[in-house]
Image: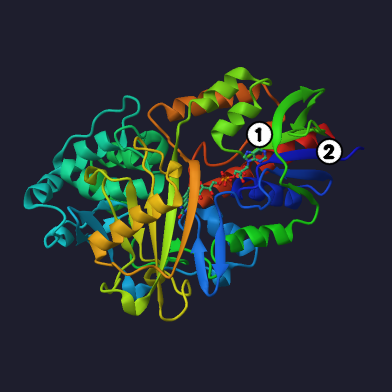
Amino acid sequence: MSTKRIGIIGGGIAGLAAAYRCEQLADDVAVTLIEREPRLGGKILTERVDGFVVEGAPDSFLSRKPRGVGLCEELGLAEQLHGRRPEHEKTFVRRHGQLHRLPSGLTGMIPTNLDALTNSTLISPAGRERLAQEASLPPVPAKGDESVAHFVTRRLGREVYEQLVEPLMSGIYAGDGEQLSLAATFPQLRQLELKHGSLLKGLSASQPAGSIQAAYPPFVSLPGGMATLVEAIQARLSRTQLCTGVTVESIRRQGDGYAITLADGHPIRVDAVILATPAFVTARLLADLDPVLADLHAQIPHTSAAIITLAFTASDLPHPLDGYGYVIPQVEETDLLACTWTSSKWDGRAPVGSALIRVYAGRYGRRDVTQLDDAELLALARAEVESTLGIAATPVRTWIHRWPNAMPQYLLGHTERLAQIEQRLAQNPGLFLAGAAYRGVGIPDCIESGERVARESTKLLAGRA
Ligand SMILES: Cc1cc2nc3c(=O)[nH]c(=O)nc-3n(C[C@H](O)[C@H](O)[C@H](O)COP(=O)(O)OP(=O)(O)OC[C@H]3O[C@@H](n4cnc5c(N)ncnc54)[C@H](O)[C@@H]3O)c2cc1C
């Protein structure tokens, strides 16, 4: 019996989770992981320098999606998982240059405690009144997809959408709620409406009874930053051949397997291939093998992001940074999505006496911020902290991370496209897809997708043995 070989393309979290799970599931399968960059991790990138822990992109993940904490537990990282600093538990929304505290009583991003809104400066009395009518509005019978903006506006009113739901949602997808598919992003909200006749009633009915203590805080991170997860997986890979700094050029069928062609023309023969690349890369790689499948991937749009991190001497700051930071609604018409007060949000991110602030730029439908040069990005971030927080001091250190075409956008029609992708995949046995392009952009979603294709590919090859 000859050893079967799986080729994984892309060493982001999805590809790494796939490699790790393949090793766990099948000791007679040889795995080769090919990553274009010299380092593994993809969007997960942490810089540790002089006591600063700076995240280039993700800084945490949701604990309620099981495969993030699940994998960390398996890798022996559970003890290190920690939540945000409770003493600063406040988030703000920027409106007309002023910060308004996000009301308490949000379930996810939906305000379910109407009393908690009474003193909110964010939502007007008219907005609160509109929200209070939600429970008596009839549900709209099921008839296909609708945008997040349309759904939230018809249930909760325009003001709650614009001031509250939209900026929180943009923090996840960097998207335009008018175009984002509800079915692809928050299908559970629509299901609650249909089941309970009201979103608010549905959300309160789905709250756990009593005070069951969740095992982890809602958002978790690691003291050494998110790259700790990448390093832990890498340390546990014992039978995977890791090829970093190697670009895959194309994939074609060869017998009942595939030939992966590298940029230098070198072919690698595999029995199954897992593509864990961004959708537009996957489109290019599949162009010869299956032009229809390639085209379906090319139709998924992406938006670019830039993270500008500023370190200050804490005593230079006129603002207490008492909170986790603020989000910025689309109606403010800026490229910026959020400003995180990193050293107030997480323990151990900056040396004593320093403060770390991170500005997130890049919104779907606006200019590509990764085209701006360093000076322009810095100016954007410094103007923001000066105008909103009064910080005119010169940062002692800065970091800029650009992510061109970083965030796939699940626009209206995304779920239909996924169904078409599944259909085409059925015609390409041994070809598997994982990563942020499909069913969730969060780290736990990407891990889950990688683990799923590991199970499917090792099962297929076991059947062929
Ligand atoms: C700014 C930003 C902030 C974020 N914040 C959070 C957060 O706080 N929490 C959270 O859960 N999620 C967050 N996300 C989302 C999350 O980080 C990503 O969706 C996830 O990491 C994507 O993982 P992936 O493995 O699918 O893709 P990637 O990480 O993009 O990995 C794909 C890999 O494929 C490689 N590759 C591409 N082309 C080739 C080729 N031809 N040959 C070989 N290799 C190739 C790339 O180099 C890359 O390493 C954030 C994303 C961004 C951009």
Is 9 on the left or on the right of 69, as rendered?
A: right
Q: Which numbered disc flags the more N-terminal residue, 2 or 1?
A: 2
Out of 318 and 204, give the one closest to the viewer: 318
Is 182 on the left or on the right of 8, as rendered?
A: left
* Residue 455, placed above or below residue 360: above
Quarter in which the N terminus is drawn? top right
Extreme residue in the left direction:
125
Of the numbered discs in the image, which one, if any, rests on residue 40?
Answer: none
Image x and y of residue 123, in percent? 14, 53
* Residue 236, placed above or below residue 369: below
Q: Which residue is mark 2?
A: 4
**Is the distance from the Cβ of mark 1 to the nearest ligand 1 atom less than 8 Å?**
no
User: Given the image, on which type of amino acid does mark 1 rest?
Assistant: Phe
Image x and y of residue 265, in percent? 79, 30
- Dot 2 lies on which element? strand
Out of 452 and 170, give the one closest to the viewer: 170
Q: Which residue is mark 1?
A: 432
Alpha-carbon span between mark 2 and mark 1: 16 Å
Res 138 quadrant in image: top left
Residue sitting at x 65%, y 40% = 453
Image x and y of residue 418, in percent? 51, 29
User: Given the image, on which type of amino acid does mark 2 rest?
Assistant: Lys
Residue sitting at x 71%, y 37% = 457
Res 118 quadrant in image: bottom left
Res 276 quadrant in image: top right
* Residue 398, placed above or below residue 447: below
Asked if the residue under mark 1 is in contact with the one under mark 2, i.e. CB atoms within 8 Å, the reply is no
**Is the distance from the Cβ of mark 2 to the nearest ligand 1 atom less than 8 Å?**
no
- Dot 1 lies on which element? strand
Is 139 on the left or on the right of 439, as rendered?
A: left
